[in-house]
Amino acid sequence: MNTTEMNESKNQARVPVLAEELVEQAQAAALKQTADYAPGEREELIARIKSLLLKQDAVLVAHYYTSPELQQLAEETGGFVADSLEMARFGNEHPATTLIVAGVRFMGETAKILNPEKRVLMPDPAATCSLDLECPVDAFSQFCDEHPDHTVVVYANTSAEVKARADWVVTSGIALPIVEYLAGQKQRVLWAPDKHLGSYVQKSTGVEMLIWQGSCVIHERFTADGIKNLKLKYPGAAVLVHPESPAEVIEVADVVGSTTALINASKTMDVQEFIVATEPGIFYKMKQASPGKIFLEAPTGGISATCESCMRCPWMAMNGLRNLAEVLENVNNEIFVEEDIRRKALIPLQRMMDFAKKRPSLKVKGNA
């Protein structure tokens, strides 16, 4: 039995199966935000949001995976588009007293952990993440307790409670050097929650790890055969893959990296066509940086294999202009993190940021 198989046999029973109905519920909620606008509705919403941001002394921070119109609005209003940690750090440096986080719940929690003095609001706090759902704190804490000789490293895509149980928090952009550093310190690593990213880190570093068996419902659907078939139509295209994808998809990639790394690769590579295996919200920044290039969605099996590419994250799609205007008007959907949890979760986050500061060539950017 190889290392991956041993890890799966040890961890698989502890990971709850993500019910398809939860994905369907998120898709239903997203439809309310993505439905066609009535004549003039979109323009009225944007104008109202811009006015309310000023009235509420608020700044909008949006994740790369949200819709292009939210990313554009964040930029137009002096906000920011980035990954979750950079969103939180921008909020810390910005003078606004209220942060509006367009993304998923763990991103709002991370913003609150790093900015406890600020009010953090979300268009829909029910927007979550499959990685978060598949790593409940009680089951994960039990697993950690069963392996007290391991250093606990968790991906940023986790709840505040899981972060509070960890020794280190990492993004996909800094996971490799941190795991290598821990191995150099003779520390044994317990990784959570993404099994594909964990396996990629393990293979890349040669460090044996105990790996929790969670996964991203979007990245897990990409297929190597689908990408190979698309390459037949676009033989000159470069394949960009996020490491939350399965190993066989990573194997066909020209570049494997975080959201930030993939955006940078699309700018710097002397290639005009790209097949991109991650959430398509990232195309906004890619096209903005390289308007003359062509970006293609990597094929997936989709839900029940009924579509060629069904990779839109339903929870990210729950963020829209309609509920953004509502949260600004009603000043609701505030994110709270218990102070004891916040203080504990801040320790592994700060540890990661301090690690990066001591190594100028490293960046902590890049979680999903």
Image: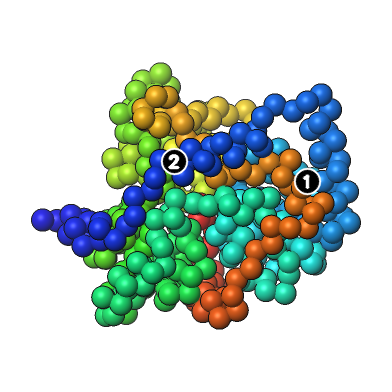
Looking at marks 2 and 1 on the same chain, the residue that comes earlier in the sequence is marked by 2
Which quadrant of the structure image shows residue 89?
bottom right
Residue that carries the numbered disc 1 in the rendered image:
325
In three-dimensional space, the C-alpha distance between marks 2 and 1, rounded to whole angstroms, equals: 28 Å
Q: Which residue is mark 2?
A: 21
Q: Secondary structure at mark 2?
A: helix
Residue 95 visible from this viewpoint: yes
The residue at the point 53 percent across, 42 percent down is 26
Q: What's the residue at 38%, 36% (across, down)?
A: 222
Q: Amino acid at mark 1?
A: Ala
Say whether residue 104 is left or right of residue 140.
right
Question: Image quarter for residue 116?
Answer: bottom right
Q: Note whether residue 267 is visible.
A: no
Q: Position of residue 2 (x, y in %)?
A: 14, 56
- Dividing the picture into quadrants, the one containing residue 148 is bottom left
Where residue 83 sits in the image (x, y, percent)?
Answer: 58, 54
Dot 2 and dot 1 residues touching (CB under 8 Å): no
Specify the amino acid type for callout 2.
Answer: Glu
Q: Is residue 67 above or below residue 56?
A: above
